[in-house]
Structures are given as C-alpha cells and as structure tokens.
Image (cartoon, grey):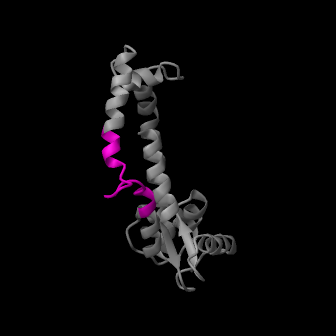
Amino acid sequence: IQTAFGQNVLHDESSWSLLLRDEAELAGLPGFVRSAARTAAQQRGLGDVHAITLSRSSIVPFLTFSERRDLREQAWRAWVGRGAHAGEHDNRPLIGRILQLRQEQARLHGYATYADYALVDRMARTPAAVDRLLDDVYERAKSALVRERASLEAVQRAAGDATPMEPWDWRYWA
C-alpha cells in the first residue's frame, strides 16, 4: 500500500504539466527556468511550448520567479494536491488503510500506538518527548513566521500589490 501511495504521487508528478505558450506566461522566469521548461515540454512531446512539471526542480523555481499569480496558484494547487483527487491514482482511500495497518503493527509489537512503536529507536523515544519538543519550538517558530509574513507583505505592498498573501505567493515575494 505504501508503494501504491508513492506511485500515485509519482504518477501525478509525471503526468501533470502547466503549459506556458507565450511571453506573458513566461514573465519573470529566468533563462535557466525557461530552458528547463522547454526541455520538459520536448521530453513529454508537447511541442513548441514550455512545461512546468511537479518535479521539485521545476515547480520551486516557477513558484519563486513567475510573475503570473494565476499560474502560480494553478501550479501550487497541483503540487500540494498530488495523489489527492478522485480516480485511479487517489491516495485518500489508501491513507485510512495505511493507518489501520500501522496500528496493527504497533499492537503486534506490544505498543499502544504506532507513534510509540516508530519512536522507540529514534532520538525522541516517545510521543511525549516529541510533544515537548514541538511545544518548546512552536511559539518561537510562530513568532518568526508572523515577522516573515509581515516583511513579505511590506515588500508586496511596496510593489503595488494589495492582494492578500496566499501560499502560492510566498516564494515569489521572498
């Protein structure tokens, strides 16, 4: 089931592409991103276009440099939605079964939860230790995130963009 899960994600990564057909859709993309997108389109037999794929080496530079907010949103939604859509490659039904099997595995090994089982030979050792670590880091991380968001929004406003900051905007404004 884990293998099927990974294959479903890989299927989405290898089958999805955002086709960029003209200069307006390529706005902001540096030469190395354009070159990689041209190569991706050629490898997929898509013709004389540029293709952004869901491979990290394609999607991250696109989200970082593309001036087209609408296209960044499309790409971001496809990236975070890998394996989570109706059809043959939908991972959502697999998730429940994976969790059931993990719980059974833990029980067979004498542990109350899969977290107890999985952490026994790791640095944290217990779910309680993980919780303490996360509690210790959470407020500091949250404060840093709030500061970073405010900084990015200031840059965004200074550039004349008053739209609300969305996940697909973060890398671009950073």
At 53% across and 85% down in the image, what residue appears?
24
Q: Is residue 128 visible?
A: no
Between 147 and 47, the one nearer to me in the picture: 47
**Residue 94 within the magenta-colored segment of the rendering:** yes
Residue 77 in the image: above or below residue 30: above
Q: Is residue 61 visible?
A: yes
Residue 67 on image: x %, y %: 53, 76
Q: Quadrant of the N terminus?
A: top left
Residue 55 in the image: above or below residue 112: below
Q: What residue span does the magenta drawing correspond to? A: 78-96
At 49% across and 48% down in the image, what residue appears?
144
For this orientation, the residue located farthest to the top is 110
Q: Quadrant of residue 115?
A: top left
Between 136 and 58, the one nearer to me in the picture: 58
**Residue 118 within the magenta-colored segment of the rendering:** no
Residue 23 placement, left or right of 71: right
Q: Quadrant of residue 49?
A: bottom right
Residue 126 on image: x %, y %: 43, 20
